[in-house]
Image (cartoon, helix red, strand yellow):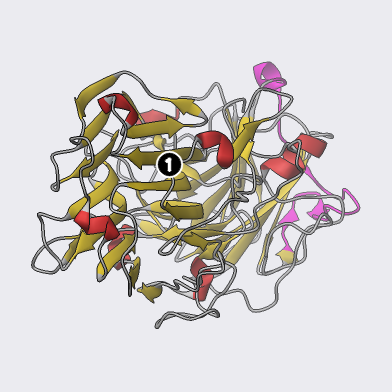
Amino acid sequence: MAFLIGGANSATGYEIDNSLRYNDGDSARLSHTTGSSGSARTFTWSMWLKRSTLSSTQYFFNSNNGHSDAAFLGGLFNSSDELLITSWDGGTELKTNGLFRDVSAWYHIVFAIDTTQGTNTNRVKLYINGTQETSFDTASYPNQNHDFTGVGDSGVEFIVGAMENSSPAYANFYDGYISEFNFVDGAQKAASDFGETNDNGVWIPKKYTGSYGTNGYFLEFQQTGTGTASASTIGADTSGNTNHFTSTSLAAGDITTDTPTNNFCTYNPLDTGSGSTFSEGNLATNTGDNKNDIGTIGFENGKWYWEVKAAGSGVVGVQHESVNHLNGTNLNDDVGSVAYSTHHGVIFHNNNSDSSPSSDTDGCIIGCAVDMDNNKIYWHKDGTYIDTSGGTQNPTTAANPITVATGTNTSGFWFPKLASGSSSQTYETNFGNPNFSISSGNADANGYGNFEYAVPSGYYSLCTKNLAEFG
């Protein structure tokens, strides 16, 4: 899909390995308290964000001096999905006209502040995907030489993924992915210090090579340790300043390889039947009977593999772009829907069905292998490929496949599809970055993804690096 960021090489060849997945229901956050004073007038935040939950107020960063509301500066999405930088210290607020509702894409956001500037619009600059925003729904700038004590003082608490108020208490937790989180103390930087435009005109990451200043930090999420800040924990600062962050309600499994340079599929809450709820970076879904959850990445070509851990009976497969996903009705029998149901013991395919031995198995893992180069699809349950009317499937040898596209759906994009076999069920989908524990660990032939069962030969995880090569 054209709007997805990732999968193309930059001029500098810079790649990002990791991101941190936040689930707002966990009240997750990173926090660090400064031990010395930094600049109160000049500083820059740069980060990459991929949203999951929409239409709720979520802070992706917040700084606060002594838990005082009067010394507060934060970046957030509001309940209307507008982007803001706001301060209770100096009355600063920039609120965008545009909305940020694309859960499939990575956004690069830079807030660059220098209150010594004579022109007020130069004192706070907002860049989105490399472009400086100049038109705002709300624009209130700080006075010249204003000191943000909630940033520059000693004892300031920096928080990534939540807001802290004067109680102190934490609220308005972020939900989604954060990658490449930079804070530069003492300099107002441009977006071009952190990103560049590739040959296809797409804004992509570039390694920052400047100074970080006294209280600056760089969070790459390379480590998996949790709790008290150190060089071996999730919040390790790799800027050289050792301004490490303490993690709360985050786990090793929240470190993912879904990044701005390799964007993985998740589910799309804007493209589903009503009644589904999403969590864990839109990989965990509570899906009602006859609802249809649809992936964020579609494909016309290539061979793709993913796994679904089912709490009960699941319906796992693919759905054509032409099918109305939003009507909340049973689409399993439609032309343009191909799925294996452990509840029905049937493979539904384009208004036809094929019997398959099956039983509802709590906690089973359903693997789905889709070969769009040859228009075929295969499934396994807990590693054993299923039987069809023709015999046992095998994607490696192309034995006993089910045909995907027929009739009017022989062209166009197909998307991962998930539905419940009966009543409301919880599912956890692994497109390569599982939110559930993996006991073995299997990558595809390109080294991408982490799966419970072996990826069939010639099949790949659904991410932009693989799409660029095979899609």
Q: Amino acid at mark 1?
A: Gln
Coordinates of residue 118 in the picture (x, y in percent): 28, 28
Residue pictured at 33% horizontal, 71% vertical: 36
At horizontal 82% and vertical 52% (from top left) the residue drawn is 395
Q: Residues within 10 Å of mark 1 (few under 14, many from 20)?
A: many
- State which quadrant residue 185 falls in: bottom left
368 relative position to 266: left or right: right
Q: At 21% from the left edge and 26% from the top edge, which residue is drawn?
A: 139
Residue 389 lies in magenta, yes or no? Answer: yes
Q: Magenta region: which residues? A: 385-411
Q: Does 31 sit above or below residue 18?
A: below
Nearer to the camera, 150 or 404: 150
Residue 229 is situated, as x and y percent measured from the top left of the image, at 43, 79
Residue denoted by label 1: 188
Residue 410 vertical position relative to residue 5 in the rendered view, above or below: above
Q: Position of residue 213 (x, y in %)?
A: 46, 59
